[in-house]
Image (cartoon, rainbow, N blue to C red):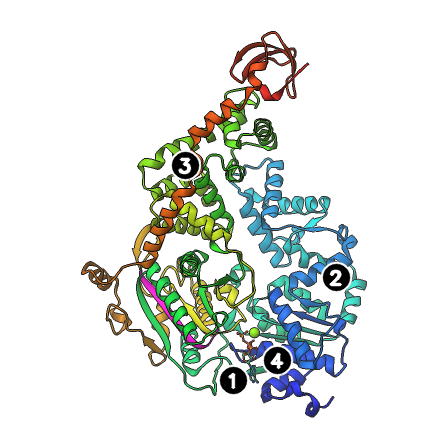
Amino acid sequence: ISAMRAPYLEGLNAEQREAVEALDGPVLVLAGAGTGKTRVLTTRLAHLLATRRAYPSQILAVTFTNKAAREMKERIGRLIGGVVEGMQWLGTFHAIGAKMLRRHAELAGLRSDFTILDADDQVRLMKQIIQAANIDEKRWPARQLATYIDGWKNRGLTPGKVPAGEAQSFANGKGAELYQAYQLRLKVLNAVDFGDLLLETLRIFQEHPEVLVEYQDRFKYMLVDEYQDTNVAQYLWLRLLAQKNRNICCVGDDDQSIYGWRGAEVDNILRFEKDFPGAKVVRLERNYRSTPHILGAASGLIAANEARLGKTLWTEENEGEKVRISSYWDGEEEARNIAEEVESLQRKGHMLHEMAILVRASFQMREFEDRFINLGIPYRVVGGPRFYERAEIRDANAYLRLVAQPDDNLAFERIVNKPKRGLGEVALQTIHQLANARGVSLMRAAREIITTEELKPAPRRALAGFVEMVERWRALVPGMPHTELAEIILDESGYTEMWQNDKSAEAPGKLENLKELVRSMEQFDDLQGYLEHISLVMEIESQDTGDKVNLMTLHSAKGLEFDTVFLPGWEEGLFPHQRSLDQSGVAGLEEERRLAYVGITRARKLSYISFAANRRIHALWQSAIPSRFIDEIPKEHVEVAESAMGASSFQNYAPSRFSQDFASGSDYSSPGWKRAQTMTRTTSKVRPPNLEVSAELVATSDPAAASYRRGERVFHQKFGYGEVTAIDGNKLTVDFDKAGRKKVIDSFLERV
Ligand code: ATP
Ligand code: MG
């Protein structure tokens, strides 16, 4: 097909077309946001197919997310007309790695039906490995080991290749040994973790040249999106596969490298030109996505970074609106105003799915979700669970539910051994058995079991401790503010501590979420009101269709675009994040700035940046300072929104100014607060059955106890045969033939 007859090539600019048509040899497209890199990659793929340079199965195309892979497939279909079958090798590194590994599983000592472990399974397994090696798991937590091992895998390092110095950093030099043991254990289980999907295929390529050659011949063309965020293992993998045909096209933007913390190496861009000499480097400078003001704001901001290759961007779009900067009293007000703006835009005809709220930290989502739920604005959380669906939030809520409603079995099961209290499978089975036999709740069964010898002393003590703790909290409910109680519960239960001791990358975010949870409870009158809110929130299903506002982290927004983008929380300590400020050197700060650049450049038409003067991050109110990134945006591209407080420039927006306005009684009526009140009122109707009342019911509905007699022969699953010597309600003292005298519960006994 000549270019003349290829409609998909029309509309591309000269440089884009050059990148699409340079089919042979290595190509690197290095260009800023919105310049059409992804579009070039997609068109190139379409071009390969349309010109019959390759069959669909001969093209390897790597995207950063599964969603991006699906979209690319659809777009190619539209470009060349009709559905494209057989694009088996279009996907993420993980998906493609998994597919290859299944085909050659035996070469990695696996069966082709191997399981892929998720992060939780991975940590659980590492715990066992650490324990088996007699290493103190408290001192050397499994999650920390997981972080090390992931890091090594990202760098393509098998256990034998871990540098001695680094192996030293875990468990006094046992790092590499544990890594080895973990790998062996995975093999026994016929399992792999995410890192293995690439590392194991890489190893197969290295150890079995015939397999490598098979793939080198198969993949006539290779294409890679978001190249700036590849890690070393991925780079080595690509390089091996491309070495023979050398038809590899990578597109990326060094200014959008935001996964350094996960092992991504921008240096891969520089390495490319070295490893593929003669590579064609195409630069795209025309941005098709955003208005000049948005582009100017983003370009001005990123210019403050030193570590960058540097590039210019221009656009022919109409000038458009300036980036709007607003300041708010606190996060609640910020969420309220943004939600109002969303509604107002919707009334003007904007679609909800063309709006996105991009946050730096996942805890920020909570305020928006609550707001949207209250106002009935449909929303979706992209790239992660919704706030209240996060594991740590579910755990915390389970504690609160159990205190308010001791008969809540799901809550009981979820947290009875979280953090670990030494209540293993056996103990839990025993509790279940009694609860089933009696038709009572797990909590009630537990309370009974601790007065007997059904459990070994250690788990019995642990369970007793747990039951007493929950009862103590329950007694505090009437006399203490529920937020304070929640703090006490998270504290005394050891749940917060569990995450404090956790050295994994996710732990700090989880602790932030827990604090945010406690904060969110303030808007309710009491614990009941809060729990009712939660049950309503959890009911709203999170299906992904329909017109919905998008809520996501900045990290998940990479590659996406929306008409309108809201960027809340631009405050020092939140964005740039404190962790990056605590680091020595500017690398962390520059990665944050790239993240800001990614954020602004997601917008086509409207971009709103905001900050709150007060934010409660670490349990205390902190007056926040506007992010330095706000100052770095050239003034000609921003407009400081007239706020209710009447300031005209954000330099005036010092926290003290806010405090004055607040003290002088400026408007701070919160509709959300009123709504929360109404909600609380309706909830009291569905208060769970009161404990004391149902305890009576249980006692009267259980006549079994009365039917044992002293001197009767009985059998007990654990203790064997014996003779009843005393009866105290449903608790019997039995002289067992082998186990001696024990106090047991009647329903564990059988007559003989
Ligand atoms: P990012 O760096 O954010 O991933 P990108 O460089 O991959 O951006 P694309 O997403 O491919 O950019 O393109 C940005 C927008 O510009 C898309 O809506 C795309 O359809 C549009 N676009 C790209 N090239 C052209 C063109 N030649 N004519 C019209 N629109 C274009
Ligand atoms: Mg892109």
Q: Answer yes or no: disc 1 within 8 Å of ligand 1.
A: yes
At label 2, counting other C-alpha atoms closer than 10 Å, the crowd grade (few under 14, some 14-19, many 20 or more) is some
Say the numbered circle drawn on residue 205: 2
Q: CA distance from mark 3 to mark 1?
A: 58 Å
Secondary element type, mark 2: helix
In the rendered image, which residue does mark 4 sit on?
Answer: 40
Tell me which numbered mark, 3 or 1, is placed earlier along the sequence: 1
- Whole-angstrom CA distance, mark 1 to mark 2, is 40 Å
Which residue lies under the disc numbered 1? 286
Q: Position of residue 442 (x, y in %)?
A: 53, 32
First in sequence, mark 1 or 2: give its number.
2
Residue nearer the viewer, 42 or 414: 414
Q: Earlier in the sequence, mark 4 or mark 2?
A: 4
Question: What's drawn in magenta, residue-wise?
Answer: 602-613
Residue type at numbered disc 3: Glu
Q: How far is mark 3 from mark 4, CA to CA?
A: 56 Å
Q: If the image is split into quadrants, where does the N terminus sit?
A: bottom right
Q: Residue 447 in the image: state x and y as whole percent.
A: 49, 26
Residue behind label 4 places its C-beta within 8 angstroms of ligand 1: yes
Few, some or many C-alpha atoms within 10 Å of disc 4 (few <14, some 14-19, many ≥20)? Answer: many
Task: Identify the residue position indicated by label 3 in the image.
Answer: 492
Q: CA distance from mark 4 to mark 1?
A: 13 Å
* Label 1 CA crowd tier, 10 Å (few <14, some 14–19, many 20+): many
742 displayed left or right of 627: right
Residue 721 sits in which quadrant? top right
